Image (cartoon, rainbow, N blue to C red):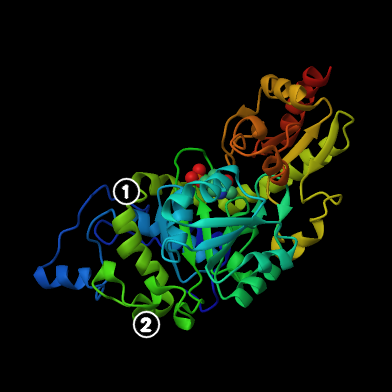
């Protein structure tokens, strides 16, 4: 088309998907096939040698899944993207090429509850570890990093406490330490925030949430900026040295900015098998076509609902970065200029019991452990998603006992407010 890079609204519909070359199908077909026929023995050998790009087996790549990966890549402004089976799979896929036994990551205390458990407990089984620090204390982030640190990890808009990370500042610390910054962009999406523009090396997304936008399938993605030099130190041997798991190919020297992505396909997806299936990719491709429209409405509704709650006597506190009262309000313009997302928490006078009553009294809101749906969702984090955390970790994550989390949907704002109003009356009456 034109020389000028296309806008977000165009890319979310067109990137990665041309009309089907075999049939002319305008919508990306669901290539429901496990394997793909080789032209001849030379073609098969070239594919396995990464000398030619093509489809072999759907654990590695699949045309429907690749269309989605390419689209997310365009929206995030990356060099390469892989999709996988969930957001949690994406986090492991992001770390896998970087880590080895004895290596650690430094992560923000303000994270999705499941991520705190994954990083605080489960990755220890691989001989990896994580140090959690307050990412507003940049000196602490640097001090927590040592010779075995292989990544710094945070969320752009942090789930659930209405926190926006100063990505530019954290990226500078990562540069100084000589490791990649990994940003979980799930709560913001590329529409509100592009972490790579702020110095992130890797961006992970749970596509389960806003990218799909309708609560149908789980999925994840890892986007690499292509800008990190894996060969500049001896810290990342899987990417800088001959990789024994792939007949001695040195991914970094051979593939440059695509090293991370090819390693993630040829070794990560091949051997860990956390693959996205084509049916799942199809639902997410459908959803992503309206991402910008939905995010505009999510943000507009969240602003209205948060402002209404803040003015209400029954509410103790609202933590939404889109409110002027938020200590993170002044970061919006720089980090996520189109808005602070639609996920926030509020504390109710009446504590734990009032929270439970509120949840049992809502009618429009769905009580589910999910976020980023077109529907408004509500949950009491302390008794559910953040239950595995200690009381101190719950407080640090903004999920104390008197706090409920809402994911504001794209219904009429007046209806959302009316539902909270009647439920608050029952909860605090
Ligand atoms: C949901 C979520 C995840 C995990 O994603 P799944 O698709 O549920 O595995 C990770 N990070 C954030 C911020 C999330 O909201």
Residue wearing tag 1 = 30
Q: Residues within 10 Å of mark 2 (few under 14, many from 20)?
A: some
Picture quarter containing residue 46?
Answer: bottom left
Does residue 326 sit above or below 376 in this rendering? below
Under circle 2, the secondary element is helix
Does residue 169 sit above or below 190 in this rendering? below
Q: Is residue 25 visible?
A: no
Does residue 413 sit above or below 284 in this rendering? above
Residue wearing tag 2 = 253
Q: Is residue 161 left or right of residue 375?
A: right
Closer-to-camera residue (63/9): 63
Closer-to-camera residue (14/315): 315
Write the residue at 61% across / 64% down: 194
Task: Find residue 55 and report its horizontal and vertical position in percent.
Answer: 25, 62
Write the residue at 15% across / 67% down: 44
Under circle 1, the secondary element is loop
- Rounded to the nearest angstrom, the CA distance separating label 2 from label 1 is 35 Å
Is ligand 1 less than 8 Å from the beta carbon at label 1? Answer: no
Task: Find residue 375 and report its horizontal and vertical position in percent.
Answer: 60, 35
Q: Is residue 334 visible?
A: yes
Q: Is residue 413 left or right of residue 56?
A: right
């Amino acid at each position: 088309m034109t020389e000028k890079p296309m806008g977000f609204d165009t890319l979310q519909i067109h990137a990665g998907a041309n009309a089907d070359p075999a049939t002319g199908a305008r919508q990306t077909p669901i290539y429901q096939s496990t394997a793909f026929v080789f032209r001849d023995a030379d073609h098969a050998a070239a594919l396995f040698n990464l000398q030619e790009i093509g489809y072999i087996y759907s654990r590695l790549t699949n045309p429907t899944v690749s269309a989605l990966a390419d689209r997310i890549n365009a929206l995030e402004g990356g060099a390469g993207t892989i999709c996988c089976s969930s957001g949690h799979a994406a986090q492991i896929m992001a770390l896998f090429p970087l880590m080895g036994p004895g290596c650690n990551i430094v992560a923000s205390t303000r994270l999705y509850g499941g991520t705190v458990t994954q990083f605080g407990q489960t990755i220890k089984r691989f001989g990896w570890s994580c140090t959690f620090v307050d990412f507003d204390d940049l000196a602490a982030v640097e001090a927590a990093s040592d010779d075995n640190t292989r990544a710094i990890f945070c969320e752009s808009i942090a789930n659930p406490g209405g926190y926006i990370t100063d990505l530019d500042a954290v990226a500078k610390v990562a540069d100084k330490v000589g490791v990649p910054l990994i940003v979980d962009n799930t709560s913001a999406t590329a529409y509100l925030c592009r972490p790579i523009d702020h110095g992130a090396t890797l961006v992970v997304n749970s596509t389960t949430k806003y990218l799909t936008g309708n609560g149908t399938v789980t999925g994840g993605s890892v986007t690499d900026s292509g800008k990190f030099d894996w060969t500049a130190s001896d810290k990342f041997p899987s990417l800088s040295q001959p990789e024994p798991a792939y007949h001695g190919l040195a991914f970094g020297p051979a593939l440059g900015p695509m090293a991370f992505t090819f390693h993630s396909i040829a070794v990560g997806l091949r051997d860990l098998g956390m693959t996205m299936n084509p049916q799942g990719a199809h639902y997410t491709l459908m959803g992503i076509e309206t991402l910008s429209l939905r995010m505009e409405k999510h943000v507009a509704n969240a602003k209205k609902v948060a402002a209404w709650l803040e003015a209400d006597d029954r509410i103790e506190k609202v933590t939404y970065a889109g409110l002027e009262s938020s200590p993170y309000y002044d970061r919006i313009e720089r980090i996520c200029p189109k808005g602070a997302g639609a996920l926030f928490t509020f504390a109710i006078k009446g504590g734990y019991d009032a929270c439970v009553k509120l949840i049992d009294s809502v009618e429009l809101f769905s009580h589910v452990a999910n976020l980023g749906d077109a529907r408004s969702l509500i949950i009491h984090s302390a008794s559910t998603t953040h239950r595995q955390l200690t009381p101190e970790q719950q407080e640090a994550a903004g999920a104390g006992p008197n706090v409920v989390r809402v994911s504001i949907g794209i219904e009429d704002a007046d209806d959302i407010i009316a539902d909270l109003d009647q439920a608050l009356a029952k909860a605090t009456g």
